[in-house]
Image (cartoon, rainbow, N blue to C red):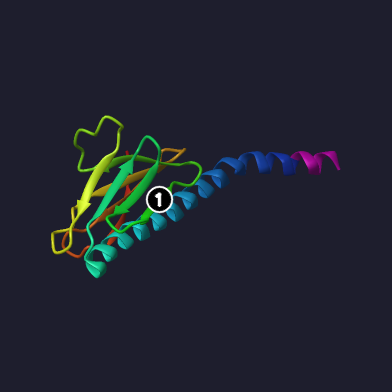
Amino acid sequence: MIVVAAIIGLIAAISFPSASAGIESARLASATDPVATFLNAAVNRVERRQQPIELIVSPRESRIWLYSNEPGFTRELKMADGIVIEGVLPPVEEDADGARRFLLMPGATIPGIGIQIANRRGAHRIVRLDPMTGFPRVESVVTN
């Protein structure tokens, strides 16, 4: 009985890192969907309601906000536990508070921005807002 318990413990110890990596990878993949949906909602609000929207991305706080001139309209997206916003593309100098601000205007071209997110294990994904179509797309980042 002790030998069987030792073998089971050894198998569990060997398989834990790969199982943990798989869970972290799935968490990162599922965290990109809310970011893409949030960006899509901002573009839809600009186009359908003809309202300017301010999009604020804060890597320090791992949050994204939407503001409009409609009274009471604000939306916030906080990244899930273990997921952080690493940066906003294209890289430029940030404001003093570390946030990047974008203004989406009705009838104007959608800014070609990307939000790079990462998990604890250093895996990365980028959610890009395509300026031609206005739709967000997710890209996996391969690091060597």
Question: The disc labelled 1 sits on which kind of residue?
Answer: Glu
Q: The residue tagged with tag 1: helix, strand or loop?
A: strand
The magenta stretch is: 1-6
Splitting the image into 4 quarters, where does residue 73 fall? Answer: bottom left
Splitting the image into 4 quarters, where does residue 104 fall? Answer: bottom left
100 lies above or below 112: above
Count the marks.
Answer: 1
Closer to us: 9 or 26? 26
Are there few (<14), some (14-19), or many (20+) residues within 10 Å of tag 1?
Answer: some
At x 84%, y 39%, the residue is: 2
Residue 69 is situated, as x and y percent measured from the top left of the image, at 27, 55
* Image quarter hosting the C terminus: top left
At x 22%, y 57%, the residue is: 52
Q: State the residue position of label 1.
A: 76
Residue 17 is situated, as x and y percent measured from the top left of the image, at 56, 40
Q: Is residue 4 magenta?
A: yes
Q: Is residue 131 magenta?
A: no
